[in-house]
Image (tube, rainbow, N blue to C red):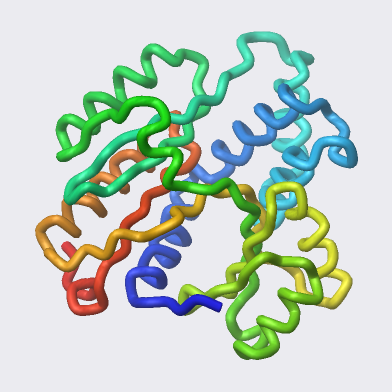
Amino acid sequence: MAGHNKWSKIKRLKAVVDSKRGAVFSKFSKEITIATKLGGTNPDMNPRLRSAILAAKAQNMPNDNIDRAIKKGCGDLGGAIPDEALYEAYGPGGTAFLIEVVTDNRNRAAADLRVLLNKNHGTFADSGSVSYQFQRKGEILLPESTFDEDTATEVALECGADDVTSDGSDWIFYTAVENLFLVGTSLKDKGHEPRSQVLVYVADNNLLLTDIEIANQVVHLHEVLSEYDDTQNVYSNFDISDDIADNLG
């Protein structure tokens, strides 16, 4: 059971605000399309597609949008099927970034990201020089009001999660990639409906930022990369001390 700080809660609240900007359905559609392309149209045989559909439905994405994304992924709608790519980068203060992209033009996406990084105190990193600092995991969110810390730990053990932590708003259950759906199903069977169930990258060790100028630069870079049209997710290894979290620009 790990703790949380102010930045963890701010980050989650920012994600909620971002999800209301209209881009959230587009990102879900791309994930469903990619999952279908790589693993087929049957959610029962394609864990990634199953998780993507559950995440989309949790955000009230219409079934028509989901069906259309699946059809695109298997080529039924014609046109180019996008590819996924993972880019690695360094940010201010020695921070590390992983940028998940879904695009129909890798060269354009790479060029665009290079410009964004160069303009915002970041640089591209060689393949493997950043990714080794992260692990691929399943992430399941439940409202923190669902239960107390002792119960959360007990439920995590019972359901097969590897770890549980809190960001001040949600309990975050981490799982092995192959166990994401099983743990999510176990939670549902116990009467706990996940708010989100997705695959993520989690940093092995977080870099605590205590300089407000560097912290503002890092947060701005994270936002700029996240807002790029082809970006699916941005992961980083930074954390921000409580002393400066409330004073971020």
Residue nearer the viewer, 94 or 215: 94
Q: Position of residue 209 (x, y in %)?
A: 22, 63
Q: Residue shown at 61%/51% (left/top)?
A: 137
Image-quadrant location for residue 208? bottom left
Q: Residue shown at 63%/62% (left/top)?
A: 174
Q: Is residue 229 visible?
A: no
Q: How many marks?
A: 0
Q: Is residue 123 visible?
A: yes
Q: Residue shown at 61%/40% (left/top)?
A: 28
Residue nearer the viewer, 62 or 158: 158
Q: Position of residue 133 (x, y in %)?
A: 42, 46
**Could you tell whether 166 is left or right of 241 in the image?**
right
Quarter of the image for the N terminus: give it: bottom right
Image-quadrant location for residue 36? top right
Quarter of the image for the C terminus: give it: bottom left
Q: Residue shown at 77%/54% (left/top)?
A: 179
Q: Position of residue 199 (x, y in %)?
A: 62, 48
**Could you tell whether 64 is left or right of 19 in the image?**
right
View extreme (top): residue: 79
Residue nearer the viewer, 72 or 92: 92
**With respect to residue 38, does 24 lie above or below?**
below
**Could you tell whether 203 is left or right of 210 in the image?**
right
